[in-house]
Structure formats: C-alpha cells, structure tokens
Image: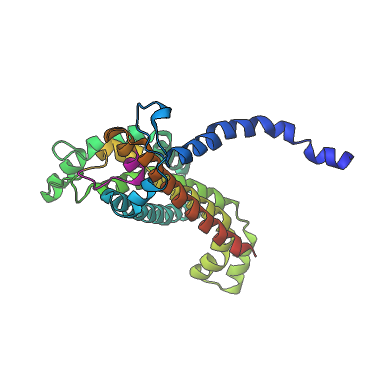
Amino acid sequence: MINQRGTREHLKFIAPAMFVMVLLSIVPTVFLICISFTNYQLGWQFGRARFNGLNNFIRLFSGADPDFWHSVVISLAFMLLATGTEMILGYGIAALLNSMEFRLKPLVVGIMIIPLAMTPSIAAQMWKLMLNAEYGILNFIFQSLFGLKIIWLSRELAFWSILLVDVWMFTPFVTLIIYAGLRSIPAEPFESAAIDGANRLQVLFYITLPMMRKLLFLTLLLRAIDSLKLFDTAFVLTQGGPGNATEFLSLHVYRLANAVNGLIGRAAAVALVLLFIITVISRLLISQQRKGEI
C-alpha cells in the first residue's frame, strides 16, 4: 500500500498542468474533429449546423477543392527545403564556430540571437520592405552591381522568397542548438581518433554524428513541424499569393474559414489533414531515432 501511494504521489503535482493541457489542447482538438463532419459556417448558431459525414473530406481528396492538393505539395516541398537547408547551414556554421576561437565569438553568437528574438510577423514585414521591387534594398544592390531588377514576390519567386526569409530566421536556431551539442562532446574520442590516424570525414561520420544523433533528430523534428505549419511569415509577405502560389495548408485553412464565406466545417477538415501529416512525420522521425538506439 505504501508503494502504491508513493507511485501516485506525483499525480497531485502534475494535475494542474494536465488540466490546463486538456483545456487548451484536447478540448479544441475534439471540437475541431466534431465540426469537420458538419457544414457549419462562420456566424451560424450551432443548432443550424448539419452533420454531413465525410463530405468535407471527400471534397478534398476527390479534387473538388483544386487548391487543396496544391497546398499539400508546396507545404511538403517547403518543409523539405527549409528543414534541409537550415540543418546543413546550421551544422556548418556550428562546426565552424566550434573549431575556431576568436575574441569576437560572443558577439557573433549574440548577433545570431537577433532573428530568434524577433516575432515572425515583424521579421516578415522587415523583409517585405527589403524585397520590394521598387525601393527595396536588395533590388538596389542588384541594380547597382548587375543592373538587375528582380520581382521577388512574383508568382515565380514568391515561394523562394519566403524560403529565404525562413532560412534567415531559423538557421541561427539550428546553429545554436548544434553548437551547444558540439561543445558538450568530450574530447577523449577525438584524441583517440587522432592517435589512430582517422581523417576528418571518419571523425565526422563515426564520432561526431553518432554522438550528436539525438540532438540532431530533435532539431530536425522541431524544424520540420514548425516549417510545415508556417503561417505568419507567408501571410505577411504574400497572403498566399500571387494567386495561390504560396497558399500553404495553414493559409488554405485561413482562406476557407475567413475569406470564403466562413466555411468552418471545410476549414476544419483541412486542419485535421494538416494535423495528420504533422503526426505522421513526427512518428516517422521518432521511430528512426529509436531504431538507432536499439
């Protein structure tokens, strides 16, 4: 009896946090699932909504909503490109910082915190001014040096412009996490590898990366999820345009719920699809990490 009480003693400490989690996460998710099976629209009384089964989902997957699959494709493409670029650049910069000691290193690390300290909407507004085709600083530089005028937020380049902003904002995040991980690795394995005559690639693939595996997977998971649900940066820069060129899934949910007669039921269905994709990708990454621990 004493052991049983002891094992349950922690419940009274975590109960408040669990209550808040249920209230702010579980309840809205259950409501989202319920409303996705109805024809509910913004401003209606709940009694007016009618259960329509899987019609909202059938509409999505049958192609009746032509923008849905476009949003899925560009969301997944953005996740792969943004996460891959940030991981590669972040690891490279972190490795460079770890291998060098210079007086201004604290200043460099402090500068990298600046993009992280800015809210995405403010950073996007700053970049929107910089990317302006007429008076933006980037076009001023390109026109001065190469005589080029680039329409950064055109249909052809808007996706890549948002990717550029995202890489600028979150590469420092990846860099700082990996840099902290590199600093925490003990020196003994590297000293032994140097005595055995291992080259840099062998040290990287047989010592550094295996010892950093958990941290790298955690960083990859955080960035993959965050880039897949991107909203604020794209909304400030393009509002999903021009046309639907940058209408990611999160922006598609917003357009259905707010800009197209408040179709809350259909928007909830898209939101559930986004939640499902995030869950599947998270499970895949976590399972891959656990395979390496077996």
In the rendered view, tell whether residue 145 sits above or below residue 38. below
Residue sitting at the far right: 1
* Lateral position of residue 92 relative to residue 43, left or right: right
Task: Pinpoint residue 22: horizontal percent, then vertical percent.
Answer: 59, 34
Q: Residue at x 47, y 52 (%)?
A: 94
Who is closer to the viewer here, 42 or 4?
A: 42
Residue 232's image quarter? top left
Residue 270's image quarter? top left
Who is closer to the viewer here, 284 or 130?
A: 284
Q: Residue at x 55, y 56 (%)?
A: 286
* Lateral position of residue 166 relative to residue 110, left or right: left
Q: Is residue 251 found inside the magenta-colored segment of the image?
A: yes
In the rendered view, tell whether residue 119 sits above or below residue 89. above
Q: Is residue 151 found inside the magenta-colored segment of the image?
A: no
Who is closer to the viewer here, 125 or 101?
A: 125
Q: Residue at x 12, y 49 (%)?
A: 148
Q: Quadrant of the N terminus?
A: top right
What's drawn in magenta, residue-wise?
242-253
In the rendered view, tell whether residue 202 sits above or below residue 179. below
Q: Quadrant of the C terminus?
A: bottom right
* Lateral position of residue 240 relative to residue 20, left or right: left
* Lateral position of residue 291 relative to residue 231, left or right: right
Residue 96's image quarter? bottom left
